[in-house]
Each structure stands twice: as structure tokens, then as C-alpha cells.
Amino acid sequence: MQCPYCGKQNPKGARGCGYCGQSLSAPAPPPAPIIPGQQPQQVIIQSTSKVTPLSILIGAVNIILAVVVLALIAVIVLTFLCIIHLPSNFPILNLPAQLEDLWIRAVFWQSQNCF
């Protein structure tokens, strides 16, 4: 059964539309009359939000949590670099120059900083 309000297909015997929530037993609303040459009405929505101490505190907490998450990611990456020993000769034969330089630097960093 097709909803007369949103046009979505619903199962047979449904009492309400699962998409827009309108009753399927009610008659469909008549379409709005179209007047030639009439421009659509503009609607301006303004939101007013005040800066409060609570909003400043919430923003600061979000920034602190983001820094903590980034620090944890950095610690995890550095830990894995020390746990997984990188071979000095990379098994890929045709490695691009940028990746080869990065690989050499990672192997050197690991040899200097990990036990």
C-alpha cells in the first residue's frame, strides 16, 4: 500500500505509514493550489544560543578528551613499533622512494628507541 502523504510503499494491512507516521486510513490531503508566477515564500530560521559557562566547560572537556584520545593512539602506535620488529630489508621489490625512505627511518627509530 502506498502512503498518500509521503509516497513510500508500506506492507498490506498497515494502519500507519512506517516512514512519515501518518494514518493510512485517513483520506489524503488535497494538494496546495499552484498559482502561476508566484514565488516561493522565503523562511529565515535563526537560532539564538548564548555562551554560558556550561557550554564553555563542555567545549573544554571535548577538547581535553580529543587530546587524550590522540595521545592514546600515539602511545599504541609507538608500542606496536617496539613490539613488532621491522626487518631491515623490506620484502616488496619495487617500493616507491617515499615509502622506502619512511621504512628506513622507521627501522632506524626502532633500533635506537626499542630494546
Image: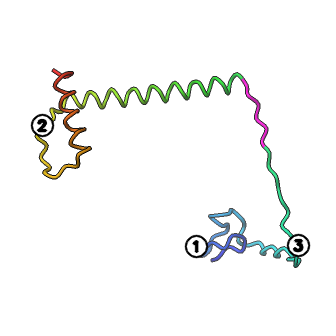
- The residue furthest front is 97
Magenta stretch: dominant SS?
Answer: loop
Mark 2 lies on residue: 87
**Crowd around label 1: few <14 · some 14–19 · many ≥20 (10 Å):** few
Q: Which is closer to the viewer, label 1 or label 2?
A: 2
Q: Residue at x 50, y 27 (%)?
A: 65
Q: Secondary structure at mark 1?
A: loop
As measured in the structure, the alpha-carbon distance from the residue carrying label 3 to the one carrying label 2 is 73 Å
Q: Position of residue 80 (x, y in %)?
A: 24, 31
Mark 3 lies on residue: 38
Amino acid bearing label 3: Gln
Per the rendering, the mark at residue 11 is 1
Amino acid bearing label 1: Pro
As measured in the structure, the alpha-carbon distance from the residue carrying label 1 to the one carrying label 3 is 38 Å
Q: Position of residue 6 (x, y in %)?
A: 69, 70
Q: Is residue 49 above or below residue 13?
A: above
Q: Position of residue 4 (x, y in %)?
A: 71, 74
